[in-house]
Structures are given as C-alpha cells and as structure tokens.
Image (tube, grey):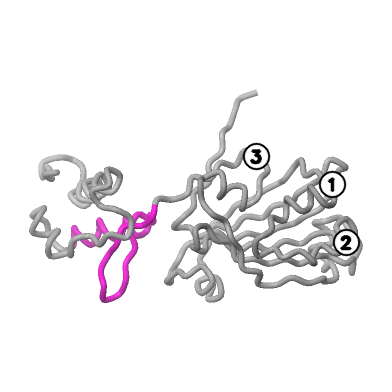
C-alpha cells in the first residue's frame, strides 16, 4: 500500500492501516516479527518518527507487542467474548474450540469479611469457600479468577480437583444449584506485579477486571467472583435492544 502524502489522513495513520491490513489478511501472522524501523522507513519513505508513532499506537491497541532487543511482533487476535449468557470460563473456551485448563492458586475456607458478607447477604464470619485459579486456554494463561461461595450450599466442594473440573458443572450436577442470573461490572486497569507474573505479561500491561455476583433460581446469592483478564487478549461484546 502506497502512502498518499497529499491526503488529509496523517502518514502514521496510513502506515498503521497498511500494517493492520497485512495482519487481517494473514500476510503477517500472529507472533511474526514486523520489519524493523529502518526497513519500514525505506519501504514507505517515511521518517523514524512516523514509524514509531504508528507502532506505538498499535502496541497501545494490543495489535502488536514489543520485546526489548528483539523487535515488534504481531499479537494473537483478541478473543471476542459475548456477554449474553451465564457461562463459565471452561464452557466459553470449549465453545471456541479450545482446551481449557486451570492451575489452582488457593483453595480454602475463610470467614466472611464485611465486604463479602454484604455482597453475598450473609452474616459476618459466615464460612465461605475461596477458590482462586489461573485460567488457561491451550496452555496460554488468560485470566486469574477468584471465587467466593457460600459454603452452606456446597458442603465439601473443595474435595474436587478444580485444576480440571468446572466449578459451575459441579454446582449444577452435584449440588443441584441452578444459576440463573448474574450482575457484572467491568473496568480497565494496569496489571500489578503478581498479575504480570501469572499472566506472563510485560509491564506496563492492560487488564480487564470483571466482578460477577451470581444468583440461583431460589434467589440465593451463591457466588461472588473477581476475574482479571489479559487486556491484550480479550474484548467483551454485548447486544443492546430498545424496549
């Protein structure tokens, strides 16, 4: 694609669009290295400042990633997650044709703190299940998920090995708990050192933090979950209708 110097669109935007077209058409595959700054300058007849501005925008948008001393590489396409039905991570990955797995980071019983007691509508010190997992798809870490459940509704649930077992599947099949509604909030942020290490990201790295409060068909607030998703791998989508 030849850049049009007389066009109102800035050169760095034209360069970015040209590279993006190569990515979407698979001329540049995921994890393939982009040409160097010098090569891009020569190919498009632009300055290094123009090249750097285009590349920096693509890094900011998660289209490419940079490795110090190695160059810039094409990112994996973002996962387009539909927020329409109440499903768990494992089911979402399976529906995309992937293989879900988990690493259990923490699994124990804890007393309800004031914040958790309010969210789950229980009294202080009520026994809760804490289950924290690193969630992976095809071996790639994508999210850190920490769930808090009212233990009185799922006694001895920690006997299960949640490194491969779906939490929602166990709740529905073993405890006959029908999850019918969830309230979710999503906000953007930067990964902290622990999140960077677990999700194998390099700072500064964007994350999407999702909080979910799940209710059963008996109007019981069963589960409160905080999930941290890789911002470079996820985008969430929903459909709005006028009633």
Q: Label 1 to label 3, Cα distance in Å? A: 19 Å
Of circles 1 and 3, the one toward us is 1
Report the residue marked by disc 3: 85
Q: Which residue is denoted by mark 2 in the rendering?
A: 155
Determine if the magenta segment contains residue 54.
yes
Measured along the vertical axis of the image, is residue 21 above or below residue 241?
Answer: below
Label 3 with label 2: CB-CB less than 8 Å: no
Residue 94 within the segment the image draws in magenta: no
Observer-nearest of 7 and 74: 74
Q: Residue at x 45, y 66 (%)?
A: 205
Marker disc for residue 176: 1
In the rendered view, does 36 fall on the left or right side of 123? Answer: left
Which residues lie in the magenta part?
49-76
At 31% from the left and 57% from the top, the residue drawn is 74
Q: Secondary structure at mark 2?
A: loop
Residue 231 point in image, percent of width and height? 48, 58
Quadrant location, the C terminus: top right
Q: Position of residue 31 (x, y in %)?
A: 32, 60
116 vs 39, left or right, is right
Image position, residue 222 (x, y; %): 81, 53
Q: Position of residue 237 (x, y in %)?
A: 53, 41
């Amino acid at each position: 694609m030849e850049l049009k110097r007389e066009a109102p669109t800035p050169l760095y935007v034209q360069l970015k669009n040209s590279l993006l077209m190569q990515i979407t058409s698979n001329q540049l595959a995921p994890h393939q290295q982009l040409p160097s700054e010098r090569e891009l300058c020569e190919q498009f007849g632009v300055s290094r400042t123009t090249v750097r501005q285009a590349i920096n925008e693509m890094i900011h948008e998660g289209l490419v990633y940079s490795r110090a001393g190695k160059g810039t590489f094409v990112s994996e396409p973002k996962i387009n997650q539909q927020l329409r039905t109440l499903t768990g991570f494992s089911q979402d990955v399976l529906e995309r044709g992937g293989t879900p797995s988990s690493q259990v980071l923490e699994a124990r019983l804890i007393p309800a703190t004031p914040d958790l007691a309010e969210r789950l509508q229980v009294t202080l010190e009520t026994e809760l299940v804490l289950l924290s997992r690193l969630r992976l798809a095809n071996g790639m870490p994508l999210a850190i998920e920490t769930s808090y459940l009212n233990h009185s509704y799922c006694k001895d649930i920690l006997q299960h090995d949640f490194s491969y077992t779906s939490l929602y599947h166990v709740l529905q099949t073993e405890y006959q708990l029908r999850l019918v509604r969830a309230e979710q909030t999503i906000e953007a942020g930067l990964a902290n050192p622990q999140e960077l290490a677990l999700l194998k990201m390099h700072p500064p790295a964007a994350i999407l933090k999702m909080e979910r409060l799940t209710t059963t068909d008996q109007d019981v607030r069963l589960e409160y979950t905080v999930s941290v998703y890789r911002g470079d791998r996820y985008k969430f989508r929903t459909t709005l209708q006028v009633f």
